[in-house]
Image (cartoon, grey):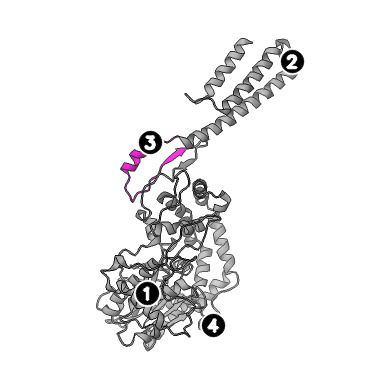
Amino acid sequence: MCSIRHLTFRFLMHLRVGGKKKNKCHVVWMKLAHSITAMIHHIRLRRLLSLKNVIIFGILTLVFIFFILAFSNELYKHDSKSVIYKHNLISQLRKSNLNDVVHFKNSGSNGDEKILYHKDTRPPLTVPRIAKYCNPPNSQPMGDEGVVSDDYKLINVHVVIRHGDRSPISRLPGFQREDMSCLLDVSQFSHIPKVANYPHVIATASEERSKDNSFKRWSVYPSHTICADGQLTGRGAIQQILNGIHYSERYFHQHQLFDATNWPKKVVAYSTEVSRTYQSAVAFLYGLLPSFEIGKINLKHASNINFCEEKIVHGACTCPGVDTARNRAGRECRMEPGYAVIMKRYSHLVDHISEVVNLKAKDLQYPSPIMDSLTGYACHNMPPPCNANNTCITAKTLEAIWEPIDYQSSCLNRNENYKKFSKIAMHGLIYRIVLELNIAIENGTNPAFHLYSGHDTTVSPLISALELEDGVWPGYASRIVFELYKKQSTGEHVIRILQNGRVVTKESIFCRGKTKDGFCNFENLKDFASRDNFVSLCESL
């Protein structure tokens, strides 16, 4: 029996991780081993041969092995968190480019990938996905709006925008985020006189605004020292000023779509009933117009975020079953195998974020509000949240948050149910655009430039309705443009569609295979926006 005791202790010694000191788990093992070996020592060999005692001994052995494996697994998990392979990490950091994804990982006991989100030194705005969403106003935006040959005369333009940079709307439960300023800071844009002069001009305009103005309950521009939830920031205003300057160069100076005297009649804007969209529209118009007189601006309320007016479309803004189609699309995307893989990685991310911001995993179930709450730090170059151990939210963390969001957006963009929902939701806006373009063709007496200042939930379904290839969640100050031209040599009327300055006419569902030199016949858009098409979509739900 001494040999059995000896072999038992040898087995226990092999279970130890090389060179580690005894801890509580080892003490438990040792006591358990003593008990079992003592029992073996005092039981006579002849009694062990009986079937009953063999069974009891086998059960006790299995229990013993179970406890050993359980404690061993817990030790492994503990060790995988505490061991840092410094040489490998430093080597990867030195080799990595700022624009590359720094991807550190350990293998867990079950083979799962564990990403070390806190091991990333990149400034968040150097990560392309984060920069695309934040859209920092560090230079004048460029694009191909209005860039055509002399044979094409510009007749009418419609621009749909998402508001500029705002403070987060979502707050993580119990988490105190740092205060964000909504004041204007144009010090970086002294080389652009129109931007540099904006604070003075807009402050004067604010005093001159009529008291009966329909937007009077809101400030004309971001003017709060501390942002409330969902307010336009100074950066957001500058984004839209730069957009307006860009369009002024193309449509006012280059194409003379309106002039210094007739712009009050030729330029019209619509804003949803939210301060950030109103202030975005004002900033955009300030950049666009040759002179800024707030009393002459034709800026109107939109009754909903889709800019669908019942009096224009005669009840064709929505139809029964449209919300069901949207919900069905969401369920179908969540059932995709790729979504399960993404969410498995997201569970590791949740563990990291909960460690940093001291929240339970149940408070971090959905990526979108987490992205909204934390992206503000990246967009404004603010110090990221850190815990007492100096473990912080990094660019890698934010980049990983975008993975499930972009997967969902891309899935919805190709889902037939979501396409139906988007086309129904956007029918009213597209219909009124077609109506205005048609009036411009027939007599040209209507406004020549139309601005629709909306939200991500305006631009995103519009992208889906047009079935454009870039279906990711739109960033701040994103824009979709419809341009109407008359081809002088043939007299035909053609359109171009642009997304953030890129011509996407040939990608649009109603122009695929029907474009020439980047243009598409206006009748194709007209047919797409027909009431018959809307009724057919509703009947297919």
Does dot 4 land on a helix, a strand or a loop? loop
Residue 409: numbered disc:
none
Closest to the observer, 138 or 210: 210
Which of the two labelled residues, at mark 3 and mark 2, occupies the earlier sequence position?
A: 2
Mark in front: 3 vs 4: 3
* Residue at the extreme front of the image, as rendered: 225
> Quarter of the image containing the C terminus?
bottom right
Residues under labels 4 and 2: Cα distance? 91 Å
Residue 50: numbered disc:
2
Residue 314: numbered disc:
4
Q: Residue at x 47, y 76 (%)?
A: 218
* Circle 3 crowding by C-alpha within 10 Å: few under 14, some 14–19, many from 20: few
* Circle 1 crowding by C-alpha within 10 Å: few under 14, some 14–19, many from 20: many
Closest to the observer, 227 or 318: 227
- Rendered view: 94 above or below 99: above
Q: Are marks 1 and 2 in contact (CB under 8 Å)?
A: no
Q: Are marks 1 and 3 in contact (CB under 8 Å)?
A: no
Mark in front: 4 vs 1: 1
Q: Amino acid at mark 1?
A: Phe
Residues under labels 4 and 1: Cα distance? 30 Å
Does dot 1 land on a helix, a strand or a loop? helix
Q: Which residues are magenta?
A: 83-107
Is 94 magenta? The answer is yes
Q: Residue at x 55, y 64 (%)?
A: 326
* Residue occupied by mark 3: 86
- Rendered view: 90 above or below 457: above
Residues under labels 1 and 3: Cα distance? 50 Å
- Counting from the top left corner in percent of width and height, residue 116 is at 44, 43
- Rendered view: 534 above or below 388: below
Which of the two labelled residues, at mark 4 and mark 2, occupies the earlier sequence position?
A: 2
Residues under labels 3 and 4: Cα distance? 67 Å
